[in-house]
Each structure stands twice: as C-alpha cells, then as structure tokens.
Image (cartoon, rainbow, N blue to C red):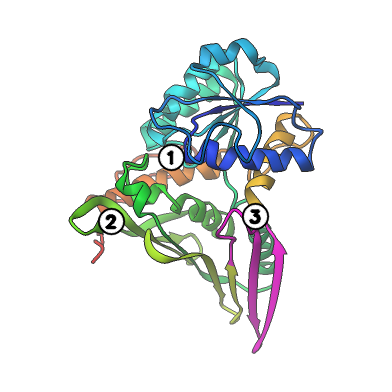
Amino acid sequence: MLRTLLLGLGRAGAGLHLPVLARARATHPELFAGRPVVGVDPGPRPLPGGPPGTGGDPLVIADSLQRARRCLDPDVTVVHLCTPPDVRAALLEEAAQLGYRRFVVEKPLAADRAALRRVREAVDRHGLRVEVVSPWLHSALTDRISALLATAGQVRSVSVTQDKARFRRSLTGGTHRHAFEVEVPHALGVLLRLLGDGEVCAASWSDLRLGERVVPHMGGARLALCHRGGARGLVDCDLTSPVRRRRITVDTADGVRLIGHYPVAQDDDVARLDMWREGRRTRELFEDDALRRCLVAAYRRFAGDDPPGAAGCLGVHARTVELLEDARHLAAGGTIPRLPRPGGPAAPGPLEARRAG
C-alpha cells in the first residue's frame, strides 16, 4: 500500500486532492496505506478552509521536503505535485534527488516548452513514473461520448464551454498567469482524445475587470484547433460568468448531436448526456467522480496492478503544454514558433491572432 506526500497545500493540494484522497481510500483501501498524508507547502499562503485535516484526511505538515523524507519511504510514497506550473520542474527534480519516483502532477504538466523539456529530462534521468491529473480524461462522461462516437459518424466539431466566476482568486494574486492555465487544459485533453492531434488556428484572451481593478489575461480564454481529418475543436472559457458550466457539444456528419454536462461542484458528482439522433432525444444521468477515478487509476498503476494506458501516458499532456503555449503566443499578438516536436513535423508558421473584444 502507498503513502502520500502533498507538495503544495493551496487550492489544488489541500482543497481538492486531500478530500478526494479520503474518498478514494474509502472505496479502495487496498491501494492506500492507513497513515496520515504528509504535506509540504513551498508557498506563503495559509491552507484554505480551516486547519489541516478539516473535512478530509488527517494531514501532518512538514516544513521542508527534507524533513518529510525522514518520515516517508520513497519506495512506498506517491508525491502529489500541486504547485504552480512555473515551479514544477524544479520541485520535481528536488523530490527526485531525495529518492521519490512516483508522482501525480497537477495540470498543466509544465508552464511552457522549456519547462516541459526540463520535466522530461528529470523523468528520463531518474526513471520517474509520472501521472498527470486529468479528471476529464478519466470521466465517465468522456468514456460514454467516446463509445457513442464509434457509431455516430464522422465528427465535424467538438466545442467545450467552461464558465465560472473566478474574481476573488484572480484579484487576490492567484498562481495562474493567464486564463489558458485554469480550465482549458481539461478541455484540450478531451479534444486530443476524441479528435486526435491538431494545431491552434485561433486564440484570444480577455482581462478580468471589477470596478477599477484589472487582472490582465484572466477574464477568459478562447481557442480553436484544426485537427487532422478536418474536424474542428473549440474551447470557450469565461472566468467572469455568474453561472458555472462545463459543457461539451459534439456534432457529426450524420446529424448526430451529443451535449454533455460535466459535474460543476465537489458536492454533486452527477453528469448528464443528451443525444439527438434521427429526430429523437435520449438522456442519460450517471455518477462521475472523475478526480477520484483519476487518482485511483494512478495509484493502481503505481502499485503495479494496471499497465499504463492512454490516460496515463505523458504524450497527450505534453502536447497540451505545447498547444497552450501556442495559444498564448497568438493571444498576445505573436506567432507560433517553428519548433520541431519529438517524432513529428514542425509546428505551422505564423497564424493571425484574434484578440478578445
């Protein structure tokens, strides 16, 4: 059984991973050691929502990775890397030098191509096993859509809408640098799974404004992907919306339309899927605790009970980092650089950027 080290105790670490680990342990006690989670927070911010352990697993705080190493055997420990993207590569290397080899890394895997290269170098140098947090790729809704598309005809477009209000966290100095880092990585992973590889053909962002206060590039993000085979992927993320929405719409050449709604709250994990085919609508509702499924799958692979699969490989997550960087360049009014990708052709040349109105 495996123990857990949370590296980063902000919203992702203490607010999401800790309570989900408690649920995962309750449903899969054979994977998780019955010992407290150990946490290390490199950041200056206090834990959200009360003292350690409130409403979740018991949490023991260590003031450094070195001190945590004294009470955690790396051979039976999974490190959850829940820090901001721009410092993950350095912390991954530091933890690897202390002997840790199993990592669950928050999305996106890295901040840009340069950081991604450092992550890959650390993985190769130390022989690390890395799983990226990707609840939408492990979602029961995504699985169901993927299964239905086998008989729905050629996909013409997939559009994802991600709306929520994110004023407080952005105005108080959140860890994200731009809106593409917040919700968009979830959508990109699903687009790559359903449509295959693609290139960013348009991207824009907007500022977050409240009265006289302005946070550049944090109001929302939009991008379009041109996929091989002619399909088009669209992502629209509004971080000023009064309504929470995580919706995916799929249209096929045969006139089939699928509209799915991912759960939007931690306290209600029910997804909905509507399908229109030949003038008839059918609806499905099902439980979809996707983050728990994601962590259970990662721990099962770490325990050796399950070989790495499509959701567990780094390929789609590395490609997501590249696409996010391309989108950022376009949104800033620049161009996509011609950089070769391992095992593939160079990215396309300059594309016109579209700015948000």
> In this view of the protein, which residue sits in the foreground, 286 or 351?
286
Counting from the top left corner in percent of width and height, residue 286 is at: 72, 64
Prevalent SS, magenta region: strand
Question: Which residue does the numbered mark 3 point to in the structure image?
Answer: 139
Do the numbered discs 2 and 1 sit on residues whose CB atoms are within 8 Å? no
Q: Residue furthest left?
A: 212
Q: Is residue 268 magenta?
A: yes
Compute the Cα span from label 2 to label 3.
30 Å
Above or below residue 286? Residue 120 is above
Q: Using residue 2 as the reference point, say whether residue 225 is left or right of it.
A: left
Q: Which quadrant of the rendered structure holds the C terminus?
A: bottom left
Question: Which residue does the numbered mark 2 point to in the structure image?
Answer: 208
Counting from the top left corner in percent of width and height, residue 337 is at: 29, 44
Compute the Cα span from label 2 to label 1.
33 Å
User: Considering the numbered disc 3 on the image, is that residue within a helix, a strand or a loop?
Assistant: loop
Q: Which residues are magenta?
A: 261-288
Mark 2 or mark 1, earlier in chain:
2
Mark 1 or mark 3, earlier in chain:
3
Q: Using residue 193 as the reference point, say whether residue 340 is left or right of it.
A: left
What's the amino acid at mark 2? Leu
User: Considering the numbered disc 2 on the image, is that residue within a helix, a strand or a loop?
Assistant: strand
Question: Which residue does the numbered mark 1 point to in the structure image?
Answer: 341
Above or below residue 30? Residue 196 is below
> In this view of the protein, which residue sits in the foreground, 33 or 85?
33
What's the amino acid at mark 3? Ser
Is label 1 or label 3 in front?
3
